[in-house]
Image: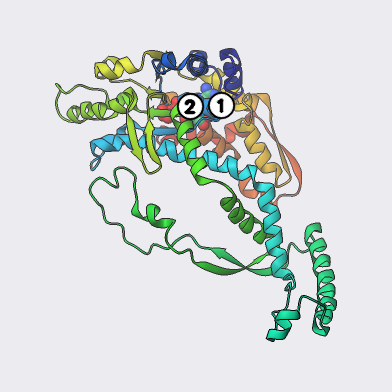
Amino acid sequence: MEELTPRQIVAELDRYIVGQREAKKAVAIALRNRYRRRLLPPELRDEIMPKNILMIGPTGVGKTEIARRLARLVNAPFVKVEATKFTEVGYVGRDAESMVRDLVEVAIRMVKKEKMSEVSEKAARLAEERILEILAPSPKRRRPAKNPLEALFGEMGESASEVDDTVESQSSRQLRERIAAELRSGALEDRQIEIEIEETPQKTLEVFTLGGMEEMGINLQDMLGSFLPRKKKKRRVTVREARRILAQEEAQKLIDMDEVVSQAIERAEQTGIIFLDEIDKIAGRENSYGPDVSRGGVQRDILPVIEGSTVMTKYGPVKTDYILFIAAGAFHVSKPSDLIPELQGRFPIRVELEPLGKEDFLRILTEPDNSLIRQYTELLRTEEIDVEFTPDALAKIAEMANLVNTRTENIGARRLHTIMEKVIEDISFQAPDLPQQRIVIDKEYVSERLADIVADKDLSSYIL
Ligand SMILES: Nc1ncnc2c1ncn2[C@@H]1O[C@H](COP(=O)(O)OP(=O)(O)OP(=O)(O)O)[C@@H](O)[C@H]1O
């Protein structure tokens, strides 16, 4: 997937995000550069660092959405971190590295999920075998020898008891085959059975904070987890549920965790994307007063991670050199030039995102795949209610969203969510009691639902 051209990447992003062409172009180029870098000879490749991006724009205009969609498009591990989190009381310098640890966790989950789905068919088969074993245990292959003579000569000929055994095992084999066929056909899904499942190790030991260990994300519990005896627990469940639980357990056993870890680290290092939100809130230099001192400090703390360093994680060391960082902020008060110079230099690509207006809202409501309107209509369709929004109703919703944004606080496209919720509230509440029907939402309906709230500034700042 990473071979997508910048034009194709923008086209893919267009499916979900309205407008913001510059930002889409910037991330598309950054992604393509990663691909180009991979084609270079190793000496040169190691010289080329990703060109990180600084997105400048008010809240709710699609900054996070662009980065998140981009990551999903190419299956890259992605985390979003609020830069202000590092200014909170109790945070210390090393915590800046936690974003890399989080990224690795995401990568581990991704790779593990992929590996599990690769073995899912086999795991399902094994799970079915285990269920069959519960429903109809396989007959013992051979009765233990009773006396030394039998032990000695037993294999030479069939004794009478063995003939009985064979007859018995034949009938039980037939029974077992019949149950197996029923099980395969899905006829036994609701039958209750008792299964034995492995419990994750109990918190048998208290973890003391040993200087630095927690900071590195190393947790004694995790380290010792694999050595602790795994307790088995019995549970009564339906065959359907047993399939799910046991297949999960079998898949766990089938995948090679060492391979998962090494691939996940590689993926985080080479394709990871870290989205650093609210970077403007930590902009400021040491020479100013008050909280700015700590802001400068935070910038210094995160700098090594962005410049390229090796972070210790519980899965091993992770190099941050080629991780793509996308920082974002509104920069209403501070400016990018208020960041410390080293950090400014690490974000050479600057893109501005446009504030969104009425026209954009109208498009956001309907154009993206899985647009808000589609989400609401599909949700209600599950209750056999067919809602239809007339074009003038959509225009009214967009207009109201814009109006509330200008009157109270501009929260961008997020306003559409609160407005839509209000418009649809009554129908949503009554849906289960309504007969199957088609409901048309027109301009009048929208106005009626919203007019009073929108007119009252105080009320709208609470409700919308
Ligand atoms: N241009 C857009 N097209 C489609 N949807 C959008 C657009 N802008 C915002 N949205 C929607 O609005 C919501 C908030 O957007 P997003 O999280 O990207 O905000 P943001 O710009 O990153 O703001 P913040 O910095 O406060 O997080 C998301 O649900 C997103 O889908």
The residues tagged by marks 1 and 2 sit, at their Cα atoms, a distance apart of 9 Å
Secondary structure under the numbered disc 1 in the rendered image:
loop
Tell me where residue 275 appears, x and y as whole percent.
Answer: 41, 28
Q: In this figure, which residue is indicated by the disc labeled 2? A: 271
For image coordinates 14% across by 26% down, the residue present is 289
Where 128 falls versus 141 (above or below)?
Answer: above
Q: Is residue 225 above or below residue 425?
A: below
- Of pointers 1 and 2, the one earlier in the residue sequence: 1
Amino acid under label 1? Val
Mark 2 nearby-residue class (10 Å; few <14, some 14–19, many ≥20) = many
For the residues labelled 1 and 2, say whether their Cβ atoms are less than 8 Å apart. Answer: yes
Q: Is residue 456 visible?
A: no
The spot of residue 352 in percent (x, y) is 42, 15
The kind of secondary structure element at disc 2 is helix
Residue at the spot x=59%, y=50% of the render?
254
Q: Nearer the viewer, residue 227 or 207?
A: 227
Query: In the figure, residue 389 lies in which quadrant?
Result: top right
- Mark number displayed over residue 74: 1
Disc 1 vs disc 2: which is toward the camera?
A: 2
Q: Quadrant of the N terminus?
A: top right
Q: Amino acid at mark 2?
A: Thr
